[in-house]
Image (spheres, rainbow, N blue to C red):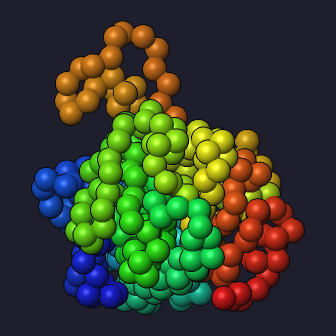
Amino acid sequence: MTPDSTMKVKAIEWQAGTLLLLDQRLLPHQEVWVKCNRVEEVVAGIRDMVVRGAPAIGIAAAYGVALAARTRFAADPDNWKADVEVDLQLLEASRPTAVNLSWAIKQMRRQIQGFQQGRDPFRLLAEFAARIHQADIEANKVMGQLGAKILAEHQEQGREVMTHCNAGALATGGYGTALGVIRAAWEQKLIDRVHVNETRPWWQGSRLTAWELQQEGIPATLHVDSAAAHQMKTSPISWVIVGADRITAEGDVANKIGTYQLAIQALHHGAGLMVVAPTSTLDMDLDYGEDIQIEERAADEVLYAAGQRIGADVEVANPVFDVTPADLVDYLVTEKGVIHRPDKAKLQKLMSHKSMH
Ligand code: MRU
């Protein structure tokens, strides 16, 4: 069974050898679970945004590896280890920017390498995927407390925060990264309101984050993306709190398109930028944000809204992530500890510690 079954909102369930993904494209109006018994279904679920959010993509992929191994072992018990590599590569290519995906596959591959050919790997791989899932929830809870502590230390700055995209329970194993900090801060009575960018073109803010906040009873104000600077100017917003899809060794942060402009706006308005991400989002093999592959999605996502053609017939750019340079990040919160103004030396030190909190 899926870990921590007491949580209110979750996007991923593992039940009796089947992966269940909550179809996030249909939220908040319909709650439909998509059943995956084969790796191809997991690949499609990630590519087509049934499941999204960097840690959630990684967890889904980990379960996907277990499903792939089941199929490959049944087909050829003596060669499954070589055969399953094709599936691992398919999974890895399903979305390019979130490094949690390749991180999770790397963990699963390491397990596979330790198995004997001819022995059924399914149960142990499914258990290992569940461990990755559980560890993500625990990391989020730790980060929630660490981030809330920073807010407590800066109470004079104002009691409202802004978030972008969805870095909540839906985007992770549960609880959330940025939204985990917001949950913890709300429980500790440190904030009064959350300003939510709607996050075009997929509306992760209006459909997912606003929904999660509503379920928790946390006051939320939803605005169009282009209202963000105005909201910062006219409301007591002290922090912009976001998740990340990939963070380089120098501390550059890839996150949902629009994060970069929010970072610039926050600096101008005296609000802090807090990036909340587990260490599975750190890519120490890349130094700079320029080296991160930014996913470019279909033009129709921009040209259409709710199935209705909106845009004129021109060329479309649809980069779905951008890179915020490290020098605009005030705090990076990970489960291993907090970094003020991240840089390479601080990140390397963090990664060399087992735990810093
Ligand atoms: O395209 P998405 O919805 O997968 O993008 C998600 C984000 O950008 C999140 O902010 C990021 O993955 C962090 S989720 C904890």
* Viewer can see residue 346: yes
* Viewer can see residue 292: no
Q: How many marks?
A: 0
Compared to 34, does 16 lie above or below? below
Where's residue 298, x and y in %? 40, 31
Residue in the foreground of this view, choosing between 92 and 170: 170
Compared to 260, does 285 lie above or below? below
Horizontal arrangement in the rendering, residue 308 relative to residue 149 (left or right):
left
Where's residue 344, x and y in %? 83, 63
Residue in the foreground of this view, choosing between 237 and 23: 237
The C terminus, quarter of image: bottom right
- Residue at position x 43%, y 36% in the image: 227
Which quadrant of the figure has residue 143? bottom right
Compared to 299, does 167 lie above or below? below
- Residue at position x 32%, y 51% in the image: 221
Where's residue 86, x and y in %? 49, 59
Which quadrant of the figure has residue 122? bottom left
- Residue at position x 15%, y 61% in the image: 31
- Residue at position x 36%, y 37% in the image: 224
